Image (spheres, rainbow, N blue to C red):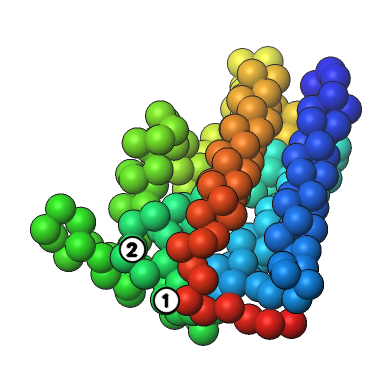
Amino acid sequence: MENINCYCEKLNSYKDIYVERANGLMQPKDNKKILLTMDIVLLASMNRALKVISGFIEMLVINNYCCAMPLVRIQQDNVMRLYAFYLVKDANKLASQVINGDKLDNIKINDNGKQQRLTDSFLSMKVSKIQSGFRDLYQNLSGYVHLSEKHIQSTINEVDNLKCIVLSDEDDYIGDDLKLCTINDMLDTSKLHLKIIDDLIDKGTRFKKDMIQM
């Protein structure tokens, strides 16, 4: 696909923003290096996003979209797990649970009078309320995470009206439209992730009950 470098530059600019946000979060407060428990989760999410985007760019360069698409799904996971903090009464407690290794889908919240576990399916539905199409993308990309018909379709291709089995470490048979859509999905998901990070940082005063002095 032409102009792949332009897309890589845009994605790299997002990496720079993550580093900028992380550095700002770790700046001393009142001459003390203090991190909220929530800050640890935010930094981990940003660190994960940096690695995901770096890996995604590498996959673009070598034309391996079979590996690139699941990375968009992982970035969606970053979004959903941070969005969970909007849904609980005590975000600081949830941060401690995440740090301690508690599984998010075992944690229940009150959702309109009903007890609801924080599953990926539930969180993707909630995020769709702030970004249309998020859940549809989540469901579609799950087909690239698990062995599915999508991998069958990329293995069996038609060449000169003949069905052929194609084994390759590159995705030459994926159209440019799908490739461009995948890149834009990563850009949109990363933009939403950064928006949530900025909002949670601005709301930092909500989490001052538990502060870690470095």
Q: How packed is label 1: few (under 14 Cα within 10 Å), some, or many (20 or more)? A: some
Q: How packed is label 2: few (under 14 Cα within 10 Å), some, or many (20 or more)? A: some
Tell me if I can see residue 57 in this picture: no
Which mark is on residue 93? 1
User: Above or below — where is 87 with respect to 8?
Assistant: below
Given contact means CB atoms under 8 Å apart, are the residues at marks 2 and 1 in contact? yes
Residue at point 63% right, 81% down?
212
**Residue that mark 2 sits on:** 88
Percent of width and height locating residue 201: 59, 54
Query: Which residue occupies the foreground of this view, 182 or 43?
Result: 43
User: Above or below — where is 53 with respect to 120?
Assistant: above
Residue at point 85% right, 32% down?
9
User: Above or below — where is 108 with respect to 5?
Assistant: below
Query: Which residue occupies the foreground of this view, 53 or 196?
Result: 196
Secondary structure, mark 1, is helix
Secondary structure, mark 2, is loop
Q: Quadrant of the C terminus?
A: bottom right
Look at label 2 and name its amino acid.
Val
Label 2 vs 1, first from the N-terminus: 2
Query: Which residue occupies the foreground of this view, 165 or 141?
Result: 141
Residue at point 78% right, 72% down?
31
Q: Name the outermost residue toward the left.
A: 113
Q: Label 2 to label 1, Cα distance in Å?
A: 9 Å
Percent of width and height locating residue 91: 42, 67
* Left or right: 147, with 112 as reference point: right
Percent of width and height locating residue 141: 51, 42
* Left or right: 12, with 114 as reference point: right
